[in-house]
Amino acid sequence: RSIYAAELIPKGTKFYKSGVACVRFIKESGLTNYLRLLPHDLQCDILLWAWATSSGAMVCLDEGSYINHGEKPELITHSSTTTLRDIQPGEELLEDYGKFINT
């Protein structure tokens, strides 16, 4: 699962609106109950995409779930999902997963 630029994406381009399809689970039972409602394959995907927060767990099922972590991220995560530099055709869009800590 990755996203690659099909064409030039100029620096400062708003890539997607973050958080529009996110769920925060405050109790472990909430996540467990949610997973029970889903087919097995999707349960595994949700567990791969979820991350711990200071108040439980979070999972987002928007475009951002296709963006991988990178040492030199090309996007700013969270509320400002804009490109940090020009992205050339064929380049993978990456972000710093560390930005999700304590959200």
Image (spheres, grey):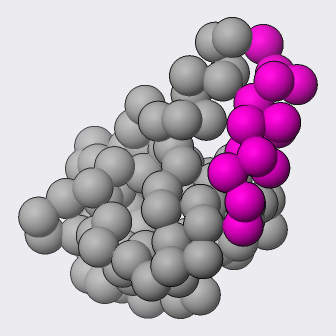
Q: In which quarter of the image is the N terminus?
A: top left
Q: Residue at x 13, y 69 (%)?
A: 72
Residue 21 visible (yes or no)? yes
Picture quadrant where residue 56 is located:
bottom right
Picture quadrant where residue 75 is located:
bottom left
* Residues rendered magenta in the picture: 26-39
Say above or below: 38 vs 29: above
Q: Nearer the viewer, residue 3 or 68?
A: 68
Q: Is the magenta stretch mostly helix, strand or loop?
A: helix
Tell me if residue 61 is in the magenta stretch: no
Q: Which residue is drawn at 19% across and 59% down?
A: 70
Q: Which of 34 and 67 is in front in this view?
A: 34
Position of residue 20 in the picture relative to residue 11 (left or right)? right
Q: Residue at x 54, y 49 (%)?
A: 50
Residue 81 visible (yes or no)? no
| Percent coordinates x, y for residue 24 in the rendering | 72, 65
Say above or below: 59 vs 9: above
| Percent coordinates x, y for residue 17 in the rendering | 69, 74
Q: Residue at x 59, y 60 (%)?
A: 57
